[in-house]
Amino acid sequence: MITFDDVVKVYPGGSTAVDHLSLELPTGRTTVFVGPSGCGKTTSLRMINRMISPTSGRVLIDGEDIAGRDEALLRRGIGYVIQHAGLFPHRTVLDNVATVPMLLGRTRRQARTDALGLLERVGLAPEFADRYPAQLSGGQQQRVGVARALAADPPIMLMDEPFSAVDPIVRAGLHREFLRLQGDLGKTIAMVTHDIDEAIKLGDVVAIFRQGGVLAQVGTPRELLESPADEFVAEFVGRDRGLRSLSFDTAADLPVRPPAEAPGLVLDEAGRPIGWRTGDGIHKIATFTSADSLRLVTDLAITSPTGIAVRVTEGGTADGIVSHHDLVDHLAGRKKK
């Protein structure tokens, strides 16, 4: 566990970057720091590996004040991923990943062998091993950065806006990869982002900072969306927070009607949806399963030319429909409970 105990950081000239921060980051979970520019989130992150020292207060790891730890040894036990990956341009991808294990005493052969396995783990094929960072796309560089941070198998990882420099499609893929890796590895992760959607998607715990380095609210993504502490938090998480909170509930309990009741639904011989027949032809159809979120179902119902979302089985057969009216009734009923 990482603990901030009444931490203050005041820079020369009197500017307060972090104002009496008390916060616990749970072991094995992802805690995301989010807030407007200049709110102290990156300063707080960098105090965990002593790149920045607090003016007062303590930062503890598993109950031990890190002020008494050797800086080099401390940092070797903490993975660090930054924007643009921060790779060594003159080293190959493989040697970038093998750097820290070699510093920790592993042989070059062992470190490079382990690095190959890590590259595969983050979704990079072996042929990337001998390339240089300049020969990679932005998304590939970020994957290498994550692999390098994992190379020494650190219990803690710090990630400073690691996905902000790539386009939305690549970012979505990196998010999936991150969630998969964290599901497998269970690291204690502190991440900084300016994007509340990214924080809600990736964080087990989200800490929202306001200007002046003050912690405005900390909680699970669901808690922040459903119970913002004040007007600042409500504005920051967005006025559409009610819709976004539906991402945390599946469609498993959503009542559906038989597909035969859907006007214009075209099925193939196996009962799989083909599209919607309207006056100007057949339109493509998007479907959902019981495991999908209520937010997805809501989006499908709203964007469907008929106002109906179609549920399918794992085999792709249509087994139910729900109209946007049915969905509204279901959500209203949930709210009354």
Image (cartoon, rainbow, N blue to C red):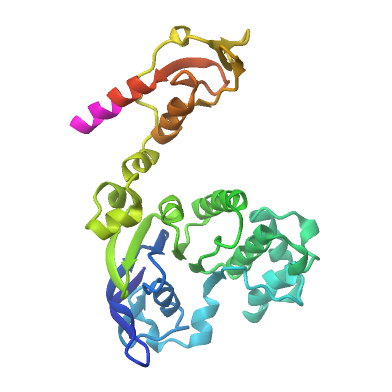
Along the line of sight, which residue is nearer the eye, 104 or 216? 216
> In the figure, 223 relative to 142: above or below?
above
Q: Position of residue 328 (x, y in %)?
A: 31, 26
Q: Residue furthest bottom?
A: 12
Question: Residues in magenta?
Answer: 330-337
Q: Position of residue 304 (x, y in %)?
A: 49, 24
Along the line of sight, which residue is nearer the eye, 281 or 183? 281
- Please name the residue shown 34% across and 42% down the image: 245
> In the figure, 292 relative to 67: above or below?
above
> In the figure, 65 relative to 324: above or below?
below
Q: Position of residue 132 (x, y in %)?
A: 77, 69
Q: Residue furthest left?
A: 336
Is residue 198 a member of the stretch shown in magenta? no
- Please name the residue shown 34% across and 53% down the image: 237
Residue 334 in view, yes or no: yes
Q: Quadrant of the C terminus?
A: top left
- Please name the residue shown 43% across and 21% down the image: 307
> In the figure, 182 relative to 299: above or below?
below
Q: Position of residue 242 (x, y in %)?
A: 31, 41
Q: Quadrant of the N terminus?
A: bottom left
Q: How many marks?
A: 0
Residue 290 in view, yes or no: no
- Please name the residue shown 40% across and 86% down the image: 53
The overriding secondary structure of the stretch rendered in magenta is helix
